[in-house]
């Protein structure tokens, strides 16, 4: 994002592309990215175009960068194309940060609670359980359950099994995610989760509309704009459906009709806005309105998710603490009664 903004500003100021890239390659904050910018400059010095140089680093510069740079080179407005990319990256980064903030808090709380619970079962609970090693005391089921968990927690084999299952699950997930069709199926499954699924849908539509609007405003046709929007959405289901869009639009069908056939993926508002834009021949502004709406919905969902998860997580921690306390104090009274 910063690189695109700086490069656009320097080009507007009359600085040459190669000179601008040489200047931007000397950065201490991210030396790895500086090396990539240095390679971009070397490619341009050897006669390649900026769009071709971008295409050499697909993991850093997505297809949208390559296409927009090519459009700027062909129209002679490379600085304007880069400025559009800067605006897109800023909006896209805002959407990404909103989604991250929604999931970072519950993940952090769950991780900390899990670690503290494991420490509790490893150190504190075993000391108390030694007191209950008395054949005259009948242990309640909750204490037996905690004793069983303590036995598992103190057994190294438990952690070996958990690590093995975790690694196997991660490898399976990575391999499945590498397959576009399986990744699309998993994404659709995630989108059926209450609240979180709405967040994924709104964020994906906001990124799609943002990229497609920018591409159309830059003079690209609907086919290419839609394809770039699907690729920029970050949603494997949308990326896979771009082929259906291309086939349908080639056959004369409208974009809105294809979207309306899959409301689980595209919602109901975006197809309506696209349909209105198609009828008035102003699709790009309608995409902008859809992007604004879904971006606002992301903000609202993040707030709602935080409000819902905070008491739920606190309740979960309270239940864990309550189970541990009951498992200790109920038989403790029995032991004290036996001693007296």
Image (spheres, grey):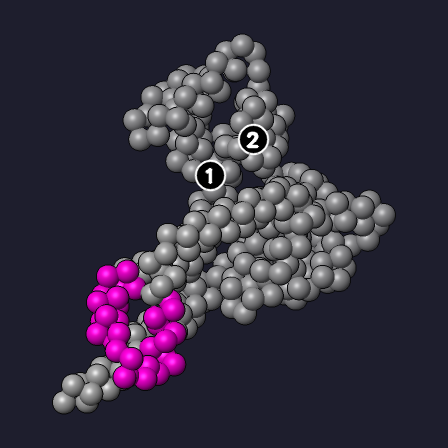
- Pick whichever, 51 or 112, lies toward us: 112
Q: First in sequence: mark 2 or mark 1?
A: 2
Q: Magenta span covers which residues?
A: 120-149
Magenta stretch encompasses residue 129: yes
Q: Position of residue 112 (x, y in %)?
A: 31, 59
Which SS class for mark 1?
A: helix
Q: For the point 54% across and 69% down, which residue is it?
A: 194
User: From the viewer's perspective, is the residue at label 2 or at label 1 nearer?
Assistant: 2
Q: How crowded is mark 1: few (under 14 residues within 10 Å), some or many (20 or more)?
A: many
Q: Name the residue under label 2.
A: 58
* Pointer 2 with pointer 1, Cβ within 8 A: no
Q: Is the magenta stretch mostly helix, strand or loop?
A: helix
Q: In the drawing, does residue 128 fall left or right of residue 15?
A: left
Where, quadrant-wise, is the C terminus in this rendering?
bottom left
**Mark 2 → mark 1, Cα distance in angstroms:** 18 Å
In the picture, measured across the screen, residue 56 lies left or right of residue 314, that is right
Neighbor class of circle 2 (other Cα within 10 Å; few <14, some 14-19, many 20+) is: few
- Which residue is at 34% across, 65% downward? 150
Residue for point 82% across, 53% down = 253
Q: Position of residue 85 (x, y in %)?
A: 51, 38
Task: Give the SS element for disc 2.
Answer: loop
Reply yes or no: does residue 89 show up in magenta. no
> Does residue 326 appear left or right of residue 240 in this picture?
left
Residue that label 1 marks: 86
Percent coordinates x, y for residue 9 in the rendering = 41, 31
Residue pushed farthest right?
251
Q: Position of residue 94 (x, y in %)?
A: 43, 51
Q: Which of 292 and 207 is in front in this view?
A: 207
Up the image or down, 116 lies above or below 137; here it is above
Indicate which disc residue 29 carries: none
């Amino acid at each position: 994002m910063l690189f695109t903004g700086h490069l656009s500003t320097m080009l507007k100021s009359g600085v040459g592309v190669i000179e601008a890239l040489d200047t931007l390659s000397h950065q201490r904050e991210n030396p790895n990215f500086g090396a990539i910018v240095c390679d971009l400059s070397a490619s341009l010095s050897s006669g390649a175009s900026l769009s071709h140089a971008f295409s050499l680093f697909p993991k850093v510069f997505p297809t949208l960068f390559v296409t927009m740079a090519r459009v700027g080179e062909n129209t002679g407005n490379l600085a304007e194309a880069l400025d559009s990319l800067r605006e897109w990256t800023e909006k896209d980064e805002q959407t990404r940060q909103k989604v991250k903030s929604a999931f970072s808090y519950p993940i952090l709380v769950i991780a900390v609670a899990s670690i503290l619970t494991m420490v509790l079962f490893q150190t504190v609970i075993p000391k108390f359980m030694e007191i209950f090693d008395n054949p005259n005391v009948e242990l309640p089921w909750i204490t037996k359950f905690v004793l069983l968990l303590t036995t598992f927690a103190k057994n190294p084999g438990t952690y070996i099994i958990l690590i093995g299952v975790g690694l196997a699950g991660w490898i399976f997930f990575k391999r499945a995610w590498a397959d576009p069709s399986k990744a699309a199926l998993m994404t659709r499954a995630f989108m059926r989760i209450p609240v979180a699924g709405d967040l994924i849908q709104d964020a994906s539509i906001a990124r799609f509309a943002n990229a497609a609007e920018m591409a159309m405003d830059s003079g690209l046709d609907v086919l290419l704009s839609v394809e770039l929007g699907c690729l920029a959405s970050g949603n494997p289901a949308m990326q896979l459906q771009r082929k259906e869009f291309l086939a349908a639009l080639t056959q004369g069908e409208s974009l809105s009709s294809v979207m309306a056939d899959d409301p689980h993926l595209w919602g109901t508002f975006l197809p309506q806005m696209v349909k209105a834009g198609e009828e008035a021949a102003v699709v790009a502004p309608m995409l902008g309105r859809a992007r604004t709406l879904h971006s606002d919905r992301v903000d609202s969902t993040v707030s709602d998710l935080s409000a819902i998860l905070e008491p739920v997580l606190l309740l979960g921690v309270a239940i864990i603490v309550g189970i541990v306390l009951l498992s200790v104090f109920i038989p403790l009274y029995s032991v004290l009664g036996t001693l007296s």
